[in-house]
Image (cartoon, helix red, strand yellow):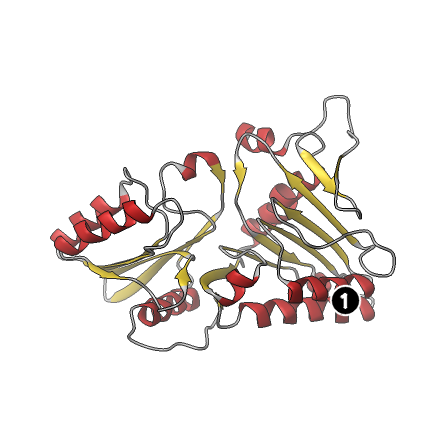
């Protein structure tokens, strides 16, 4: 019945806008939120917006002053006497070029609460409401910073109570002063923190009395690392999230970002034991950030070493 999508980076040859045009021609209600200021794709996005609008697709451009960076699709189907929502939430752009060269993650779900949240978020982005609260989704700039701070505080409380406490996070850049100060607080409380940060990182790990419990590495290989994953031990009742946001001020305050919990037990096991574990095992393409700001090779644990990207390709 309806299709709604956030298109951040489309590319010139994307199969997605033509599919939306066909859907609109077949009587589906199609809404495309197109970010006109998507870096490297501004011209492509403007051209696709014009073509979609001419084909009868409802084209919107988001909220004034906020770049829409979240990767989100909602499909509403009538199945029997019920309406069912299918949602895709990702770290990757719907772009045929970057999808071949970036590592990314996406969640495909029929979770009813997430579906309702996605519906209300699209209504807000289209100007039909001002949603300030969500059931499961974490949305910047509404509540992402506050939610992350609450998760950090919860790990501190678990550590004080002697329960399992740990944070593992993988994302592109760490450059938000408030988040950095909070991570220093987490480290001083004794919580172990492992960060996999592809690029800019303004936190200094391994400094006694400040960040000795924080370890930071990056992985540079054949593919550009682009996925975002956030793990919290939560006293043994582990929480895992994926989404579009880095820990930078612009992602937390000046962009629409979407982060979703992952609640399926098998998906959580994969993210924790396979994906994150592979990046933390990598001793060929990974480098570890030192307290002085330099990066150092990681001593190999075996004669052949372990390459996380090769491991995922072989799977």
- In which quadrant of the rendered view does residue 274 lie? top right
Image spot of residue 267 (x, y percent): 54, 50
Pick the front one: 61 or 91:
61
Q: Tell me if I can see residue 9 in this picture.
A: yes
Q: Which residue is mark 1?
A: 185
**Disc 1: CA contacts within 10 A as few (<14), some (14-19) or many (>=20):** some
Relative to 90, 301 lies left or right: right
Image spot of residue 97 (x, y percent): 38, 36
Residue at screen point 12% across, 52% down: 25
Image spot of residue 112 (x, y percent): 40, 66
Q: Residue furthest top?
A: 303
Image spot of residue 104 (x, y percent): 49, 44
Dot 1: element: helix
Q: Tell me if I can see residue 26 in this picture.
A: no
Pick the front one: 17 or 114:
17
Pick the front one: 43 or 108:
43
Q: Residue furthest right?
A: 208
Q: Is residue 243 above or below residue 295?
A: below
Pick the front one: 50 or 272:
50
- In which quadrant of the rendered view does residue 128 lie? bottom left
Q: Quadrant of the C terminus?
A: top right
Residue at screen point 42% across, 39% down: 98
Relative to 8, 162 lies left or right: right
Residue at screen point 82% across, 70% down: 160
Relative to 9, 54 lies left or right: left
Q: Number of marks in the image?
A: 1
Q: Quadrant of the N terminus?
A: bottom left
Relative to 303, 68 lies left or right: left
């Amino acid at each position: 019945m309806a299709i709604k999508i956030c298109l951040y980076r489309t590319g010139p040859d994307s199969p997605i806008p033509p599919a939306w045009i066909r859907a609109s021609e077949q009587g589906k209600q199609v809404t495309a939120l197109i970010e006109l200021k998507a870096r490297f794709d501004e011209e492509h996005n403007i051209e696709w917006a014009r073509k979609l609008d001419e084909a009868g697709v409802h084209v919107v451009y988001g909220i004034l002053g906020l770049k829409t960076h979240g990767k989100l699709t909602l499909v509403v189907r009538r199945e029997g006497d019920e309406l069912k929502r299918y949602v895709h939430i990702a770290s990757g752009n719907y772009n045929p070029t970057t999808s071949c060269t970036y590592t990314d993650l996406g969640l495909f779900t029929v979770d009813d609460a997430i579906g309702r949240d996605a519906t209300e978020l699209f209504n807000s982005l289209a100007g039909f409401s001002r949603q300030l609260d969500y059931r499961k989704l974490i949305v910047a700039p509404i509540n992402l910073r506050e939610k992350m701070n609450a998760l950090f505080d919860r790990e501190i409380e678990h550590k004080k109570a002697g329960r399992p406490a740990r944070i593992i996070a993988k994302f592109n850049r760490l450059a938000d002063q408030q988040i950095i100060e909070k991570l220093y607080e987490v480290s001083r409380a004794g919580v172990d923190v492992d960060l996999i940060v592809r690029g800019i990182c303004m936190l200094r790990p391994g400094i006694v009395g400040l960040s000795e419990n924080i370890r930071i590495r990056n992985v540079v290989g054949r593919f550009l690392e682009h996925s975002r994953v956030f793990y919290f031990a939560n006293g043994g009742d582990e929480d895992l999230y994926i989404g579009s946001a880095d820990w930078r001020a612009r992602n937390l305050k000046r962009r629409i970002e979407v982060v979703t919990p992952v609640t399926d037990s098998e998906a959580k096991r994969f993210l924790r034991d396979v994906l994150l574990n592979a990046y933390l095992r990598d001793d060929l393409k990974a480098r570890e950030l030192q307290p002085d700001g330099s990066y150092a090779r990681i001593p190999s644990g075996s004669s052949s070493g372990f390459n996380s990207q090769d491991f995922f390709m072989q799977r």
